Image (tube, grey):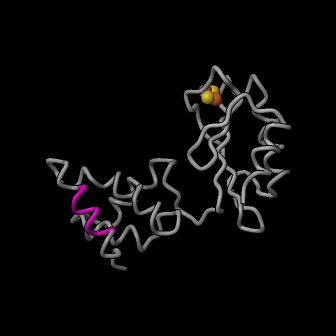
């Protein structure tokens, strides 16, 4: 695949910020994920490899290392529930169970209607307001079943 012209121009501009072009790979993967369907497909990895003069396996190595990069299609909304110690002590298991029940998505999977992906995350640095989840890049904290219902019920 070839990057859309506008995205390619943006990535070229992005690379001028770094002394080594390859240092632009991570921000480029973010932009590709945002612009090209919400996940990093093998075709996107190959396009990035060509763009950065790397081997596809090197791009895969980076994309697969960071959990913020999705290597399979996700639902329209991605819910990452923290399950580290502070959130665990304040009910992360109940949050996960409630979110899965409410969305119909299993942990690590998508809901049958394609609307939701549920995953578990390591500490997000919001321990003081545990339990929490990240919904499409926005933190929601001090979660209760009622609060979760209100948040998810407001999504289109
Ligand atoms: S343990 Fe959940 S935000 Fe830190």
Q: Quadrant of residue 138?
A: top right
- Residue 56 against residue 18 in the figure, above or below: below
Q: Farthest residue in the bottom direction?
A: 1
The quarter of the image holding the N terminus is bottom left
Q: Is residue 11 magenta?
A: yes
Left or right: residue 73 versus residue 132 is left
- Name the one closer to the observer, 126 or 23: 126
Residue 13: percent from left, percent from top: 22, 59
Q: Farthest residue in the top direction?
A: 128
Residue 89: percent from left, percent from top: 75, 22
The quarter of the image holding the C terminus is bottom right
Residue 65: percent from left, percent from top: 44, 49
Ligand 1, by image quadrant, is top right
Residue at horizontal 79 percent and vertical 29 percent from the top: 91
Secondary structure mostly seen in the magenta stretch? helix
Residue at horizontal 65 percent and vertical 56 percent from the top: 77
Left or right: residue 87 versus residue 71 is right
- Name the one closer to the observer, 155 or 36: 155
- Name the one closer to the observer, 154 or 114: 154
Q: Which residues are magenta?
A: 7-14
Q: Quadrant of residue 7?
A: bottom left
Q: How many marks?
A: 0
Residue at horizontal 64 percent and vertical 46 percent from the top: 135
Q: Farthest residue in the left direction?
A: 19
Q: Is residue 123 magenta?
A: no
């Amino acid at each position: 695949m070839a990057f859309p012209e506008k995205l390619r121009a943006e990535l070229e501009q992005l690379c001028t910020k770094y002394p080594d072009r390859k240092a632009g790979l991570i921000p480029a993967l973010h932009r590709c994920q945002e612009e090209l369907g919400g996940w990093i497909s093998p075709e996107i990895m190959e396009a990035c490899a060509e763009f950065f003069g790397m081997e596809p396996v090197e791009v895969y190595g980076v994309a697969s290392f960071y959990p913020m990069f999705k290597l399979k299609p996700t639902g329209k909304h991605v819910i990452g529930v923290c399950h580290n110690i502070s959130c665990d002590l304040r009910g992360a298991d109940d949050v996960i169970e409630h979110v899965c029940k409410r969305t119909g998505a299993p942990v690590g999977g998508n809901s049958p209607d394609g609307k939701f992906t549920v995953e578990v995350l390591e500490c997000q640095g919001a321990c003081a307001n545990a339990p929490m989840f990240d919904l499409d890049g926005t933190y929601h904290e001090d979660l209760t079943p009622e609060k979760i219902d209100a948040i998810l019920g407001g999504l289109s």
